[in-house]
Image (spheres, rainbow, N blue to C red):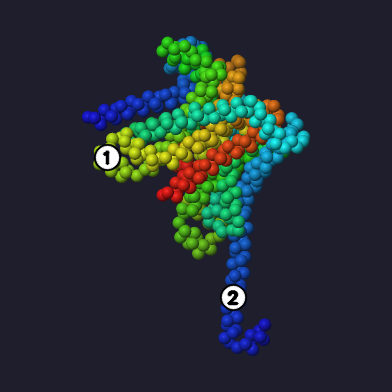
Amino acid sequence: MSELNKSMGLGTRSRHLASSKARIRTSSLKIQRLRENALAYTFLAPSLILFAVFMFYPMLKSVYLSLHSTDPAGNVAAYVGLDNFAVLFSSGQFLQGIKVTLLFALLTVPAGILLALVLAALTHSKLRGMRIFQFAFSLPMVLSVGSSAVIWKFLFHPTLGMFNYVLSLLHINPVPWLTSPDWALLSVAIMTIWMNLGFNYIILSSGLQGIPDDMYESAKMDGAGPLITFWRISMPLLSPTIFFVTVVSIIGAFQSFAQINILTKGGPVNSTNVFVYSIYQEAFVNFRFGTGSAQAIVLFVVILLLTMIQFKWVERKVHYQ
Amino acid sequence: MKGRLHSTLLYVLLTIAAALILYPVIYTFFMAVMSPEEASAYPPHFIPHSFHLANFTEVFEIVPIAAFIGNTFLISGLTMIGQLITASLAAYAFAKMEFKGKNFIFSMFVATMMIPWEVTIIPNYLTVRSWNWLDTYQGLTVPFLATAFGTFLLRQFFLQLPKELFEAARMDGCGHIRYFLFHVLPLSRPALGTLAVYSFLNMYNSYLWPLLITNSENMRTVQIGISMLEFQESTSWNLVFAGTALVILPSLLLLVFGLKQLVRGMAAGALKG
């Protein structure tokens, strides 16, 4: 090497030296990059492993189970193809469950959002003491479904409950809140609206706060009253937030479980047998993991569609801005 | 004059709304201090006429509520710490490091947000059971130790840290690990706090998973324990409510101290989604 350099003269030698320096630099860069790769994957490993074991593998396993019949211990007995799904869609109970879930969403989502919107609009002023109201309206959010449902169960109590007592003061006949198939879903919905209020209120309030003040000021200069200002300025600017809350609420309605389990156990006569409750029943009460998984897959598809609609909407919104 | 009338009307409206919304919670604390006779009296009392603090000690005697609370704090605390560790590590990798397959792995994280937890519950139950993790703390916590939401929340925060800081640290010969531990984490306390409050509350309030995988009384969490209180024939309402009051108290305290943090976290979630 060095002999070769000598014969080549000074110019080439120095050039050669420079290139070997560069080579050393690139190889050290390469090592550095390799090291950064290794370090990055080390940082990601805990999350990736946990996701793989408790998210991706179960997702595949759900699909697998939904195509098989299982014994009560959860072992796969036989491949049945799409039979589980066929059974679901031909059984009146599953279709009834979908109907109940849709009705539940219809009862809880619009009312829950409207109420939260009104409260958010009313507390969106700089008057004194608003923080106390903001605190009060956010409060249901931190209470768990479990304890809230226990509280509401006693409020709904047929004879000793506060609701029927208040009705009796107003000379109205007692209502069979949780015991009649006609009332049970509505009662669970009322409790759910209350429970969701905190989240909806917080999201809509922060949406309102995101609207710049000068918009309101210029509307005021033009002589617009509070209602017109709300309809013409707040609502359009708030529509992405409202849309977000709507989608989240619908997804939430499809995932409700605890309040159903504590208040009604799906009854009376399946009138409150919503999606997740029916998965729970199928898999963990009747030990039919195959059809339970088939229901879970249907739930996944429904929620995936809702999420995709939301992303599409957000994309379009971003586009128009 | 007109403005005065308006704001008075507004206050009246808001007070009525607040009273209605807070009523179930106030009712819980009222019932919790009533005597057994008063709690089951008809007509029911709106305001307690008796004041029985003994209910709280009695509820500890009839159900292992101390164990429930201990369990729940332990699993919520463990999950919180676990999520802070896994999410901050992953978020740092996404925000500050260059590596092969970054986009692909990032989209895998996004994908996990599309999978509702309920959909994976049957296989997860079977997995945990096959590992003999039913009725154990690891069974209650390990499936929840990683979170895509937390990763996104922290990544967003890490990205906002000034670039100059990283360059300066680099000049001083500071590697990724040192930069992460001694610069990024201390600067990210607000975001870490948000994630901490959020994950603690989530775990504290969870219901379906603990219901499925705990059987023995001493492994129950408060949410399951409290909903079982009402099935015990011997217990009376005032005790059920004393227990419920104890269970919701920590969440209420968290709200008092963490409302701002929580709001920030959820606003971030809303913007993201």
Task: State the image coordinates of residue A288 (x, y, percent, origin top left).
Answer: 70, 30
| B63 relative position to A105: left or right | right
Dot in front, 2 or 1? 1
Quadrant in which the N terminus of chain A is drawn:
bottom right
Q: Look at the numbered disc 2 and give the secondary structure of its residue.
A: helix
Please give the chain letter of the residue carrying mark 1.
Answer: A
> Disc 1 designates what residue?
A220
- For residue A293, which numbered disc appears in the image? none
Going by the numbered disc 2, the residue's amino acid type is: Lys
- For mark 2, name the chain: A
Q: Up-down: is A5 above or below A177?
A: below
Residue at position x 56%, y 17% from top?
Answer: A179
10 Å neighbourhood of mark 2: few (<14), some, or many (≥20)?
few
Q: CA distance from mark 2 to mark 1?
A: 70 Å
Side of A129 where A94 appears, left or right = right
Taking the image as drawn, is residue A126 in sight?
A: no
Name the secondary structure under disc 1. helix
